[in-house]
Image (cartoon, helix red, strand yellow):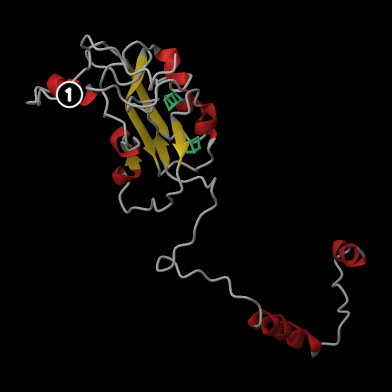
Amino acid sequence: MAEELERSKGAEPKDTKPGFQNPVAGFGVTFKAMFKKRLTEQYPEQQKTTAPRFHGRHQLNRHPDGLEKCVGCELCAWACPADAIYVEGADNTDEERYSPGERYGRVYQINYARCILCGLCIEACPTRALTMTNEFELADSSRANLIYTKEQLLAGLEEGMVDSPHALYPGTDEQDYYRGLVTEAAPGTERQVAHSKGEVVQEADSTFGGTEPASEGVIGR
Ligand code: SF4
Ligand code: SF4
């Protein structure tokens, strides 16, 4: 306080230590640091595990039968403070259905040259379609490569899933998906998808869209 007062009056603060002690004190700091635990990380040779709730690359999630959770509402884009998200929604049709509801995200892009990984977009998402992964190696030398498309962000297919577009699980509606009643793709969905793409399919065990009812073990209604 006294030093600040002296400085404000234009006077040099008084040195409380004898002059020769200053360099010694400086080396003392260096000397003490030599015996402290080193924090240097040998990245990328040694990868450190991130915290479980680390904010890394985004992911667009799927329902357990493979349909997309994104409904193309753009709330994530509006919530983003860096204007890093671009969404174009479109209507599902009976012939081409990507999500259980009325709409789906036809175009979805995140620009990682802008994104600050703050997570506000995932808080805004009403369907938990958008979450963040632990992947952090996003650097690139090209701006174009930093714009991730829907294809890059969409989650992979897990067991029991069939890639969209395909029909709703027979006998269910949109609400049943959010109630967690659909736990896997309906039998024969793969065949139905292949058929809609004009691919040659085996006539083996298809029950999709036929007279056979949906498995009661899958839908707990
Ligand atoms: S994490 Fe933040 S900056 Fe990145 S897209 Fe989401 S809201 Fe925008
Ligand atoms: S990710 Fe979520 S918030 Fe963004 S458009 Fe899709 S449903 Fe809406």
- Residue 217 is situated, as x and y percent measured from the top left of the image, at 38, 22
Residue 198 at x, y percent in the picture: 9, 22
User: Measuring 10% from the left and 22% from the top, which residue is drawn there?
Assistant: 203
Of all residues, the one furthest to the right in this rendering is 2
Residue 68 versus residue 30 in the image, above or below: above
Q: How many marks?
A: 1
- At 31% from the left and 13% from the top, the residue drawn is 170
In which quadrant of the rendered image does the C terminus lie? Answer: top left
Q: Nearer the viewer, residue 65 or 156?
A: 65
- The residue at which mark 1 appears reads as 205
Identify the element where label 1 is drawn. loop
Tell me: 65 left or right of 188.
right
Taking 180 as reference, is 198 left or right? left
Would you place residue 32 above or below residue 148 in this image? below
Q: Is residue 63 above or below residue 141?
A: above
Asked if ligand 2 lies within 8 A of label 1, the reply is no
Q: In the figure, residue 155 lies in which quadrant?
A: top left
Q: In terms of image quarters, where does ligand 2 lie?
A: top left
Residue drawn at point x = 50 percent, y = 69 percent: 41
